[in-house]
Image: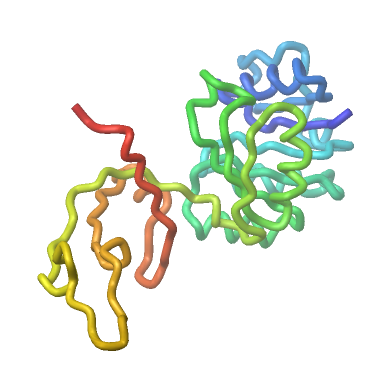
């Protein structure tokens, strides 16, 4: 049986804790706000919740993420510490420096609605172990990197396509004697407007790169 500690029993944490228990995991939760319900899974303190756990979920705000990790550290042992908040890369680096088996987990949906079935991206030294533990419990987890911070995901809308020269973007582009030619799909600049709230949570810097996927099935009315 997988033992899971849930630190933070707000709306998302409580839903995850309940779903994990229903899936057969041994769950212990902790939150300093004693008014929050925990369906009989509440521990007296962080140490009691974390001790003996295989995975520790930090479902807290970015403001207290470092504090929660430091509080869990003495009792963490070999457990995976999965941070689920949408903090900036600098904070993720700070947490990864503190915790050996750290997993940066990005949840791709409304957890209070979808619970344990919320798809997730995981990165960091503990990402594969997190996926191995939570996949059988019902969470779709994709490991994107063994480096922390790689699970960041930005949403945006395509604002337009840039034009090009006729020789490159013509219906039948010019070709030289060697047969070299340029495919249109390789040279179309696309302008994407990102969500300002996500940029504020995870600021981008010059020199970074990412893989973009465009859903052509969706549109904004």
Which residue is outermost to the bottom?
177
Q: Which quadrant is the N terminus positioned in?
A: top right
- Residue 53, compared with residue 35, is above or below; it is below
The image shows residue 138 at horizontal and vertical percentages of: 70, 27
- Residue 145, compared with residue 51, is above or below; it is below
The image shows residue 107 at horizontal and vertical percentages of: 54, 37
Q: Residue at x 39, y 72 (%)?
A: 207
Specify whether 170 is left or right of 213.
left
Q: For this rendering, which residue is in front, 1 or 191?
A: 191
Specify whether 83 is left or right of 78.
left
The image shows residue 103 at horizontal and vertical percentages of: 67, 49
Specify whether 177 is left or right of 75.
left
Q: Residue at x 37, y 66 (%)?
A: 205
Q: Residue at x 23, y 85 (%)?
A: 176
- Residue 90, compared with residue 158, is above or below; it is below
Q: For this rendering, which residue is in front, 183 or 18?
A: 183
Specify whether 73 is left or right of 57.
right
Q: Residue at x 47, y 53 (%)?
A: 88
Which residue is outermost to the left?
166
Colouring convention used in this rendered image of the protein: rainbow
Residue 182 is drawn in which quadrant?
A: bottom left
Q: For this rendering, which residue is in front, 20 or 94?
A: 20
Q: Which quadrant is the C terminus positioned in?
A: top left
Total number of numbered discs in the rendering:
0
The image shows residue 189 at horizontal and vertical percentages of: 24, 62
- Residue 171, compared with residue 66, is above or below; it is below
């Amino acid at each position: 049986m997988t033992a899971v500690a849930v630190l933070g029993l707000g709306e998302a944490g409580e839903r995850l804790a309940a779903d994990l228990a229903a899936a057969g995991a041994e769950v212990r939760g902790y939150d300093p706000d004693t008014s929050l319900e925990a369906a009989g899974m509440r521990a007296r303190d962080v140490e009691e919740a974390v001790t003996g756990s295989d995975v520790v979920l930090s479902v807290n705000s970015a403001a207290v993420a470092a504090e929660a990790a430091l509080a869990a550290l003495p009792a963490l042992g070999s457990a995976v510490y999965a941070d689920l908040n949408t903090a900036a890369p600098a904070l993720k680096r700070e947490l990864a420096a503190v915790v050996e088996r750290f997993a940066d987990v990005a949840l791709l949906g409304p957890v209070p609605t979808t619970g344990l079935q919320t798809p997730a991206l995981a990165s960091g030294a503990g990402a594969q172990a997190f996926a191995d533990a939570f996949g059988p419990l019902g969470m779709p987890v994709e490991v994107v990197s063994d480096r922390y911070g790689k699970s960041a995901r930005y949403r945006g809308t395509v604002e337009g396509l840039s034009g090009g020269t006729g020789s490159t973007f013509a219906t039948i582009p010019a070709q030289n004697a060697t047969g070299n030619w340029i495919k249109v799909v390789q040279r179309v600049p696309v302008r994407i407007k990102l969500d300002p709230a996500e940029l504020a949570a995870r600021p981008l810097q010059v020199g970074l790169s990412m893989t973009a996927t465009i859903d052509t099935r969706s549109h904004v009315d």
